[in-house]
Amino acid sequence: MHSLKQTFYRIDGPTWLVALALYGAWFLLVWFNALLPWWIILPVGAYLIAWHFSLQHEAIHSFRGVPAWLRFAIVFPPLGLWFPYPLYRKSHTTHHRDINLTVPGVDTESYYVRQADWARMGPVTRGVLRFNQTMAGRLLIGPALRLWSLIKKETDRVRQGDLSHLPHWAAHVIAVGVLFWFISGVCGFPWWQYCLLVAYPGLSLGLLRAFTEHRAAEDSQQRTASVESNVLFGLLYLYNNLHVAHHLKPAMPWYDIPRFYRENRAGLLASNGEFVYTGYAVLARQYFLTPVFSPVHPTL
């Protein structure tokens, strides 16, 4: 029995279970879409898409009990539509250079802008960026802003003569086409409804995790937060909401994070300057319509 348990964890059994549950539930949701009301499809679909983003994140850092090609194949399907997995992997690897955390233009996941860029913006752009720093804004317009930023960066890259990302986008477009064929052609789920009821709210829910996981601070260790939420959000984000633990030990499998966090909580919070919240409801009460921080980076 002990050897079976060791084998189960050596092959990342908990992550396999997440992948099987995720894809199985997604298939059932899409297959039986005609029998389900929108108010069931939306929350369930959003949870599954955000969960898939978490699985992709896990495959970048951990999930080492399977060959690299199989790990890639498991998380490659673009259920959330928006971003080719290889480019996300490349971008997120850059994000983990802690010395650059939150620095706009360097940290690929920063929500700050430089003072000089802010000075050139008009009042509408500034208002949009401020609204995006509220929880309501992040959920409502956050995905649209991420998509716009992605399109701008990728088109600028091509205009500058860098075509290295085009093969990834070609594979992504083909994969999305196959996905839409299955969703609409086979299951009768209109593709535009999938975008509105599943993909967009799924990205919104995924962005909720990143809402306040980093802040500007002189000490790089104090830039990473922890949100101590319940098992529903913990499983959704594969405990990446305990973000300070993840940045300290990024290769740690998701199922080991809760125990590590409990055993080292005092030290982790001492190192990050007590940058901690006791749940997403607390964040909502404080920042639903109030910016969590100014869009302008305070030290640049």
Image: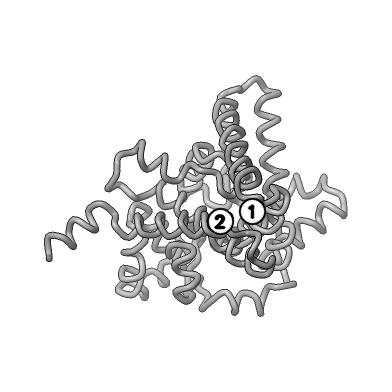
Along the horizontal axis of the image, is 266 left or right of 7?
right
Q: Dot 2 corresponds to which residue?
A: 49
| Residue type highlighted by circle 1 | Ala
Is disc 1 surrounded by few (<14), some (14 to 19) or many (20+) residues within 10 Å? many
Marks 1/2 in contact by CB < 8 Å: the verdict is: yes
SS for dot 2: helix
Residue at 41% x, 72% y is 270
**Residue 44: which quarter of the image?**
bottom right
* Percent of width and height locating residue 173: 61, 34
Q: Earlier in the sequence, mark 1 or mark 2?
A: 2
Gap in angstroms between the C-alphas marked 1 and 2: 7 Å
Along the horizontal axis of the image, is 135 left or right of 102?
right
Q: Dot 1 corresponds to which residue?
A: 199
In terms of depth relative to the viewer, which is nearer, 137 or 46?
46
SS for dot 1: helix
Residue at 45% x, 45% y is 75
* Percent of width and height locating residue 157: 65, 28
In terms of depth relative to the viewer, which is nearer, 248 or 77?
77
Asked if residue 216 can be seen in this view, the reply is no
Point out which mark residue 86 bears.
none
| Residue type highlighted by circle 2 | Ile
Rendered position, 26 above or below 136? above
Rendered position, 98 above or below 18? above
